[in-house]
Image (cartoon, rainbow, N blue to C red):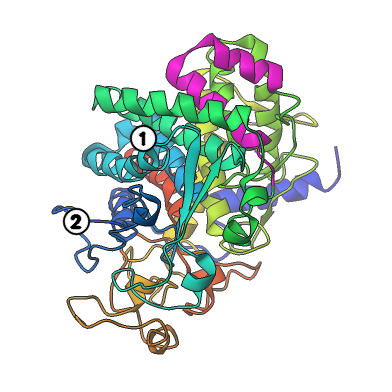
Amino acid sequence: MSPLLPLVALLFLSILAGGVGASAASHDYADALRKSILFFEGQRSGRLPHAQRLSWRRDSALHDGAGEGVDLTGGYYDAGDNVKFGFPMAFTATLLAWGVIDFGRSMGAELQDAAAALRWATDYLLKATAVPGVVYVQVGDASRDHSCWERPEDMDTPRTVYKVDRSHPGSDVAGETAAALAAASIVFRTRDPSYSQRLLQRAVAVFEFADFHRGAYSGSLHDAVCPCYCDFSGYDDELLWGAAWLHKATRRRKYREYIKSNAQVLGASDAINEFGWDNKHAGVNVLISKEVLMGKDDELRSFKEYADNFICTLLPGLSAHPEIQYSPGGLLFKEGASNMQHVTSLSFLLLAYSNYLSHANGRVPCGNGAAASPAELRRAAKRQVDYILGDNPMKMSYMVGYGSRYPQRIHHRASSLPSVAAHPSRIGCKAGSTYYLSPNPNPNLLVGAVVGGPTNASDSFPDARPIFQQSEPTTYINAPLVGLLAYFSAHPDI
């Protein structure tokens, strides 16, 4: 054993206990859960329903797809802009569905709203995949959109439609879309059987397209989707991911055999310590491991071994080769913008895996005689959730509207500009700059939005609208957090 491991283990215990400078305050996880779901209403595109609760938002982008002869209204704006990016939207839907599947029993009264948030995405994904052999993957010119600061209700930038097809493949975005549709079909299986069947049939067709016409969508649509959502990790992971969710949804042997025969060639063993809209390998391994831990498929045991190795890299003190950094305040930290996307998605995997292990009375072997119990994984995940909710050196919540202190100047057009009710006349593309540069708090509260948060090891947060790397919320930050908050609302004292 390395002589440094005992010291690192002490640091890990400190992180689990609350981290440096953290408070000991308890949290209202049920309130945070409600707000984390409410956030998605603020990201809605299209014609809003009568039950819309964030009333400062209005209808927007009502003609999306019309120029192509298709209906692409609805769906979500992914972040603080007005573009609909299909790749992160599909991942958002997959993680919302996974959260409901694993933790829906803990959602109580919020389960209906969580399902509604998921359906807002899947209704759009059904529209985007309605033409056989085609997946519409984006609406809006990102470059033109990002040169403006205007409300979605006012936007006049081009609503250009981008698609992948047999001649211009996109196995990554199509594979993720298939995964989202398949996962959602499980959620709606008893709630709306006919809708569930429609989702599943479409997932099968979209996956076949993704697999038979292989290629990366950022190769086919480079200038449109890069640099915002380039696929840096390739499409292999999305093919395994789509097959894994289709196997879970259908129990068909063909998908199990696909996973087995393609595991190595599609990189299941890749030691990648991240999980998010771009890279799904860790999620594949954790998802499939449940089958192994339940004794249903020992032939897929290698996936559990990969999952064990991945989990160990997240736990300093339990691996001779930890891959993840932690800030002095205990925040899981990776270089780059929007760090909270890593925090919530990796924490979700920690929690999901801890539950699978618990049912099998298992532990995670980490080498050198070290091992982690399911309870330790849950505490590690809870520590990250608590950091987001206020147990951090800044003593602030990174969820808008939760707690007494939270970000006031988030990088979000609709939130930062006056609502249509407050300012009925149009605010032009460049006229919005006045609000963008204003030091004043946003006039509209995007309740439940979790921002990118600290992006360096100092645990600092400037709360400045122009610093989008730290102040911008995204749907794929919130999506995995919904499942986490559901679990901890029912188990606050683990």
Label 2 residue SS? loop
Quadrant occupied by the N terminus: top right
Q: Amino acid at mark 2?
A: Gln
Q: Nearer the viewer, residue 168 or 442?
A: 168
Q: Which residues are magenta?
A: 233-262
Where residue 69 appears, x then y in whole percent? 36, 49
Q: Amino acid at mark 1?
A: Val
State which quadrant residue 94 falls in.
top left
Quadrant occupied by the C terminus: top left
Where residue 436 appears, x then y in whole percent? 43, 83
The residue at the point 63 percent across, 10 percent down is 298
Q: Real-space Cα distance between discs 1 and 2?
A: 21 Å
Q: Nearer the viewer, residue 142 or 472?
A: 142
Q: Earlier in the sequence, mark 1 or mark 2?
A: 2
Where residue 43 appears, x then y in whole percent? 34, 59
The residue at the point 69 percent across, 45 percent down is 233
Dot 2 corresponds to which residue?
Answer: 52
Q: In the visual, does 108 lie left or right of 323?
A: left
Label 1 residue SS? helix
Q: In the visual, does 95 lie left or right of 217?
A: left
Dot 1 corresponds to which residue?
Answer: 100
Name above or below for residue 474 compared with residue 470: above
